[in-house]
Image: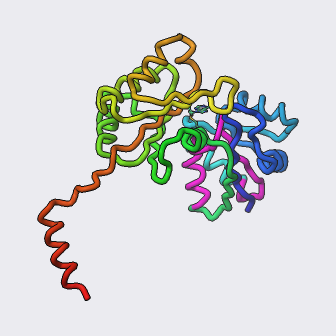
Amino acid sequence: TATLYIVPTPIGNLEDITARAIRTLESVDWIAAEDTRHSHKLLQHLGIKTRTLSLHEHNEDKRTAMLCHRLKSGESVALVSDAGTPLISDPGFILVRKCREEGIPVVALPGPCAAITALSGAGLPTDRFIFEGFLPAKAQARMNLLESLQDRTCTSVFYEAPRRILDTVKDLQEVLGNDRPIVMAKELSKTFEKYISGSPAEVIAWLTAEPAHQKGEFVLMVAGAPAQLNSTPPEAMALLKSLMELLP
Ligand code: SAM
């Protein structure tokens, strides 16, 4: 049985591919790509001639059966998505789960990921965070999700499409007001990379200042709610205190 490699690719800057990723893409029998035409550009840039086939959300079920068969017959496969780390708001979960179930070796390479890059550069607490991926498209589900941020004390990380970024920040403002700091990371690792930090009102002002400000790729981060330092009821504190006195 051969190995399935999960291979992250750049999220903008082509220099961000690792030496190991290049060597893996060169040496496998197949590259399974979310969009083969898109990945061909990267492969061409790297001078890699490995055969490709497509694996996207509409054919992942069918492709999984076929790829597991190939892996078992000794052909190795590298999975790539259009950008960043496969499976992170990208296809691949069905394939990796199946390989794990069938005892096919899976090796995931470390590499670029927009969420982690944004988080490490934002200046928000990173000791605990929740990655939410894309917000639900339906209005009610969206609002429910945003409301769940009200009491959340850790940092939240979202991916957002340019056509929705302004509406999403407005929804955040509606649900959380202007007291919770947010950070919007735009065009990470690209020429016009930018972090906009402030209240939702300040980020909305920036987004609407120029049409170009709403174009590109965005990671949105929301600071956690301030931790309730004294959330233990006074009766419980009194009881705790008297119990402590009994301790040796
Ligand atoms: N698998 C990818 C990863 O590891 O980051 C994410 C794929 S997801 C379909 C695409 C989303 O990731 C974009 O809509 C955007 O929210 C975010 N993204 C990708 N590249 C980015 C970049 N260079 N700057 C900011 N956000 C980016």
Name the residue nearer the viewer: 21 or 121: 121
Residue 89 shown in magenta: yes
Which range of residues does the magenta coloring cover? 71-100
State the image coordinates of residue 44 (x, y, percent, origin top left): 83, 31
Query: What residue is rendered at 73% in x and 28% in y?
Result: 37
Image quarter in which the N terminus is found: bottom right
In the picture provided, is 130 more to the left or to the right than 10? left
- Judged from the image, the quadrant occupied by ligand 1 is top right
Look at the picture and state if 58 lies above or below 243.
Answer: above
Question: From where the camera sits, is residue 60 visible?
Answer: no
Q: Is residue 194 above or below residue 130?
A: above
Residue at point 84%, 45% (across, down):
26
**In the image, is 233 to the left or to the right of 25?**
left
Front-lying residue, 231 or 82: 231
Q: In this view, does 70 lie above or below 234?
A: above
Spot occupied by residue 154 in the image (x, y as percentages of width and height): 40, 48
